[in-house]
Image (cartoon, rainbow, N blue to C red):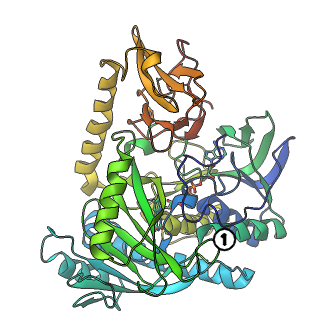
Amino acid sequence: MNPHAGSSVSVWMGIAARPDFPSLTQNEHSDVCVVGAGIAGLTTAYLLTKSGKTVIVLDDGPIVSGETQRTTAHLVTALDKRYFELERLHGENGAKLAAESHAVAIDTIEAIIRAEGIDCDFERVDGYLFNAADEEPDLLDRELAAARRAGLTNTELVDHAPSIPFNTGRALLFRHQAQFHPLKYLAALALAIVRGGGRIFTETHATAVNGGESAHVTTSGGSIVSSDAIVIATHTPSNDRLILHTKQAAYRSYVIGVAVPAGTVPKALYWDTGDPYHYIRITGTKDGTPPGQEVLIVGGEDHKTGQADDADVRYARLEQWTRERFPMATDVRFRWSGQIMQSVDGLAFIGRNPLDYDNVYVVTGDSGTGLMHGTIAGLLITDLIQGRENPWANLYSPSRVTLGAAKDFAREAVNSASQYLDWLTDGGVGHNDQILLGTGEVVRHGLTKAAVYRAPDGTFHECSAVCPHLGGIVRWNHEEKTWDCPAHGSRFDSVGTVLNGPANENLYPAGALHPIGHAER
Ligand SMILES: Cc1cc2nc3c(=O)[nH]c(=O)nc-3n(C[C@H](O)[C@H](O)[C@H](O)COP(=O)(O)OP(=O)(O)OC[C@H]3O[C@@H](n4cnc5c(N)ncnc54)[C@H](O)[C@@H]3O)c2cc1C
Ligand code: FES
């Protein structure tokens, strides 16, 4: 498996050592098998070992080789979905539980850091939400009232975010947010899991998941982990063929890291209310940044996965936006993108996998606050496995139907369906020879299409362009050098190896007849 889910490199990726773990080479048994070693999987494994369970974690890269290494690591109770929207979708009590669970998630991260003595630059900071230029004028007032009703009583409106070098105008201050270095945190958490008796196997792809009495996970090398319960924490679950993928959509988000003189941007979190919105923070990258400098992180410019391929334009817009507001910014040191799973009702899906055995659990639908949702998953799934009541179980249930989200559900369904028109269009180029070195193009072959990658040395790698999930036609992503499916967000590396679900198989050889949506369980 490609360990890094793309070619771009985040500010975190270069500067934290990841501990190595062996691959799985024989059958094993544990109380719980967790698939995925991002924040959701590792937090769940850690809390389960603390509660006395034996745990095995599997990951097909090194640990933290998915989206957690591409995050910007704002730890927040200020959710992406506005609280007045959460009230409409989940009721006043639902919005309260969402605020409470996000606050508990930050507290849990802080408590784990203390208990395990983890040095990961964790700091409590304030967060400021300010109006994008063309926003409705009373949005912040409505959000203030709803946030307070949700229990965030120390939220307040201020005239502007203080000390930042541009005038934000009125801003909503969320107190007691936090930031940290996600890779340092999770590298240490993985070691704590092992100290607690858990076992971690990397470079081990889970190919099939079977729940029930003889629950087991089959891996790419043929070895099997049998367990009493299985947790799928792969960011987007490949063991769910359709249900969850109609309730969430994959988006790519873009980030730049710009050098600024240390101390010139206050340590706080910032977001504007645009759609897509900008998100901002400062990091003191102790290792790797020249003395006297910090990195200003600015993200935004989201689009649906596979539905745009203009990363350079998006980075340029982010840079312009940043330079207009932070005149002290010097060189752009990092540019990266990552994937967000946006649920139709603004909250993650955490709990029992719909239409599956009771002992198969999933966590997905991060909705932009996946570090919180991944930590909530650790708390909630541990309770479910231990047979304990959890007040958040219904709110996050993967089986929930949120009537107020029907419009978004329909819009995403129509968007997904319209991607299949790619079956009817021509390829990006007529012949392989027209493909530039180091890039890929979809080429029409009679009734079907091939995904052709031309390596820098001129060698051609040809696969079927038909996504093995449900038959979308993949598109080339020049920035990440991946094939991305515009229907539900599956991604494959340049030679067709699967990187992100819902697909759980590689692209087939070009011209091969293959079953679409082939179920692996
Ligand atoms: C640009 C960007 C900015 C963000 N900013 C924030 C933020 O400020 N605050 C916030 O809370 N959230 C943020 N998020 C979201 C958050 O970072 C993610 O939702 C979260 O890190 C996902 O964690 P995860 O553990 O669910 O998935 P991942 O970190 O993707 O982990 C999944 C793991 O599963 C493994 N895997 C997948 N399939 C298999 C398989 N079949 N077999 C074995 N292993 C497998 C992968 O290799 C990977 O290591 C951001 C995301 C992006 C992209
Ligand atoms: S991700 Fe569903 S068809 Fe490709």
The quadrant the N terminus occupies is: top right
Q: Nearer the viewer, residue 187 or 95?
A: 187
Q: Which quadrant of the frame does ligand 2 lie within?
A: top left
Q: Secondary structure at mark 1?
A: helix
Which residue is painted at 42% across and 20% down in the image? 434
Given the image, on which type of amino acid does mark 1 rest? Lys
Residue 367 position, x and y percent, is: 41, 59
Question: Within 10 Å of the Cα at label 1, are there few (<14), some (14-19), or many (20+) other Cα atoms?
Answer: many
Q: Nearer the viewer, residue 112 or 182?
A: 182
Left or right, 510 with respect to 77, comes to right
Quadrant hosting residue 266:
bottom left
Work out whether residue 315 can be spotted. Answer: yes
Left or right, 494 with respect to 114, comes to left
Which residue is painted at 60% across and 22% down in the image? 459
Q: Where is mark 1, residue-wise?
A: 184
Which residue is painted at 79% across and 57% down in the image? 20
Quadrant hosting residue 140:
bottom left
Residue 432 position, x and y percent, is: 47, 17
Which residue is painted at 86% across and 41% down in the image? 25
